[in-house]
Image: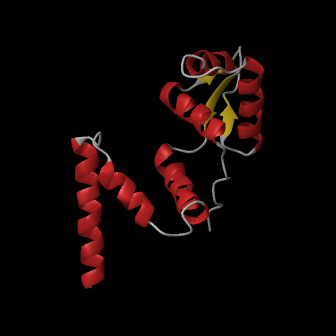
Amino acid sequence: MAKAPPTLGDLEVAILQTIWGAQPCTERQVWERLRTEREIGRTTVLKTIQRLEAKGVLARVPDTAPVQFRARFEPQRLLPSLVGRFVEQTLGGSFGPLVAYLADQRQLSTKDLAALKAIARKLENEASD
């Protein structure tokens, strides 16, 4: 059985998303991208990258100078786990608030809406089996 991905905090997720979008990348590159979105110190980014590396989420790219990092998990493997934990821990296991939130969103793309419709069809088919 595969080991469950570790729990991640908001900053860890933001750093991981930055790395997914530009990997491999250096700590400085991550910091430069993040500081355009929020006020954050370079040492904070470095320490968070070190935590992600210790958790097994990031890996150093061998033989690079300066040191570059890459994600050890693809988004499609890690994100469902994070959403599941959010539903369990924050929403008490109920998808109702999440569904209500999605229903109120005006900025969902056509692709997002198509994905939601496909999920609803799949759930309906499974319920009728």
Q: Answer with the quarter of the image where residue 36 lies.
A: top right
Q: Residue at x 54, y 22 (%)?
A: 37
Left or right of 2, for residue 115? left
Query: Which scheme is used to colour this image of the protein?
Result: secondary structure
Q: Is 76 in front, or is 36?
A: 36
Tell me residue 17's x, y (percent). Answer: 53, 34
Q: Residue at x 58, y 34 (%)?
A: 14
Image: 30 above or below 90: above
Left or right of 18, for residue 114? left
Q: Answer with the quarter of the image where residue 18 lies.
A: top right
Tell me residue 125's x, y (percent). Answer: 24, 76
Left or right of 38, for residue 113? left
Tell me residue 115's x, y (percent). Answer: 28, 53
Q: Is 24 in front, or is 102?
A: 102
Query: Which quarter of the figure is the N terminus placed in?
Result: bottom right
Query: Which quarter of the figure is the C terminus placed in?
Result: bottom left
Tell me residue 98's x, y (percent). Answer: 42, 58
Circle count? 0
From this viewpoint, which residue is outermost toward the bottom?
129
Q: Residue at x 31, y 51 (%)?
A: 104
Image: 67 above or below 80: above
